[in-house]
Image (cartoon, rainbow, N blue to C red):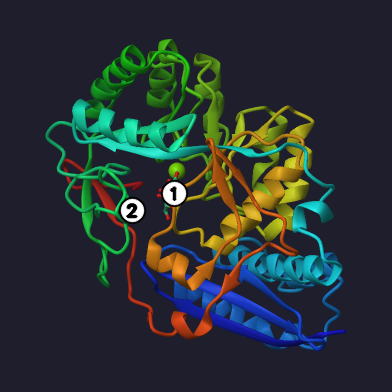
Amino acid sequence: MAIEKVDVFVTSPGRNFVVLKITTTDGVTGLGDATLNGRELAAAEYLKTIAPMLIGKNEDNIEDIWQYLYKGAYWKRGPVTMAAISAVDVALWDIKGKKLGVPVYDLLGGASRTGLLTYGHASGVDLPSLFDSIDSYLDKGFKAVRVQSALPGIPSTYGVAGSANAQTGNGEKGMRYDYEPARRTEVPVEEVWDARTYMNTLPGVFEAVRNKYGNGIALLHDCHHRLSPIQAARFGKMIEPYDLFWMEDCTPAEENQEMLRVVREHTTTPIAIGEIINSATDYLTLIKEQLLDYVRSAVTHTGGITHMKKLMDYASFYDIKSGFHGPTDVSPVGMAANLHLGLAIPNFGIQEYMRHSDETLEVFHTSYTFTDGMLHPGNKPGIGVEFDEKLAAKFPYQPAPLPVDRLLDGTVHEW
Ligand code: GCO
Ligand code: MG
């Protein structure tokens, strides 16, 4: 009973993914996800560096292996380290579930609910295309929808299908927003950002959406780190009448977390933050001072199930809920890990869900289900995902860095 083999795969079925497979001496395998969008090879190299250290360790001792990788590295935290540790951690939970014949959520205390409220990504270059997009999500059964809109005079902006670089997708009705494979270049493409245009446009968009659809659906929005604290405070206040479920990453609070106090003092619009925060330690101030309402981290970027469970347990004492990151750059393995944890914790909030492309789903066989706007991880032992290595080998890595943003005067800005 020991770890015998550690394999790292970088594959690109529709987009790039980093997959870890751990095999034990009795032939049980577990999968982990270390995909770090635009920096995939760095995460894969980190895994290759730690792989020999895992051989011979008892796969049952998940916590000890976590501490060994985290404290033992001397260099703590950071996205590459935490994505790699996460992949090992999820693979070990997968193995434990398979060995015991139970789904991972059972190991985490069992199901706290019957399914996970899920939101999809609607967007439009204008109101009619936005309404079409929202309709297509409502038709699929979604009860919560993220709303993103193009900005007049700005050629393409984050989150909007149909703007310059988005792709159409997967036979789904309407356009689909996803940065890969539209952006396969070694050097990032550049986009333009203007906060004034944004703040003048978005409140009217939310008003139009509420007028058309009423108050029955949950609406979410991602500001994608683009506002200053005082702009975010004003924006949150401006959109209060439209009752958003959350505004996400309103300001880049991962560096100066105190900035969120300014936002909090001015608005009751709920705050979701953290998709690029990668350790529980980095949430301590945010949670203790109640500067956020939803934790946006993904299991796959934040040290795995072991670490995220601790983070969410701490958050639960402050009534702060989960809103785990679930874009297509979280692989189906990472997505399944999010779902198992989300089903088990008492303070689940909502789960983001962008369906992966058909190509991706041919390589990763999932057992999670989507019914009536709710996801469920399924009841297979472990995390319930299988990986077709042979097929994966047919999709070699291609560089695909995320875009870089500049202001109208050329200044580099958060994307
Ligand atoms: C989201 C995110 C993503 C990120 C992407 C970067 O809320 O889903 O903001 O769209 O931009 O995951 O890798
Ligand atoms: Mg986001």
**Pointer 1 residue:** 354
Residue 240 vs residue 110: left or right? left
Numbered label attached to residue 238 = none
Q: Residue at position x 30%, y 48% from top?
A: 176
Q: From what the image shows, is residue 393 above or below residue 273?
A: below
- In percent of width and height, residue 160 lies at 27, 42
Sequence-wise, the earlier of marks 2 and 1 is 2
- In percent of width and height, residue 334 lies at 58, 60
Residue 278 vs residue 136: left or right? right
Residue 130: quadrant of the picture: top left
Q: Depth check: 193 or 3 in front?
A: 3
**Pointer 2 residue:** 178
**Please, what is the three-letter code of the amino acid marked with disc 1?**
Met
Does ligand 1 reach within 8 Å of label 1's beta carbon? yes
Q: From what the image shows, is residue 31 above or below residue 140?
A: below
Whether the residues at callouts 2 and 1 have beta carbons within 8 Å, the answer is yes
Q: Residue at position x 58%, y 48% from top?
A: 297
Residue 329 vs residue 297: left or right? left
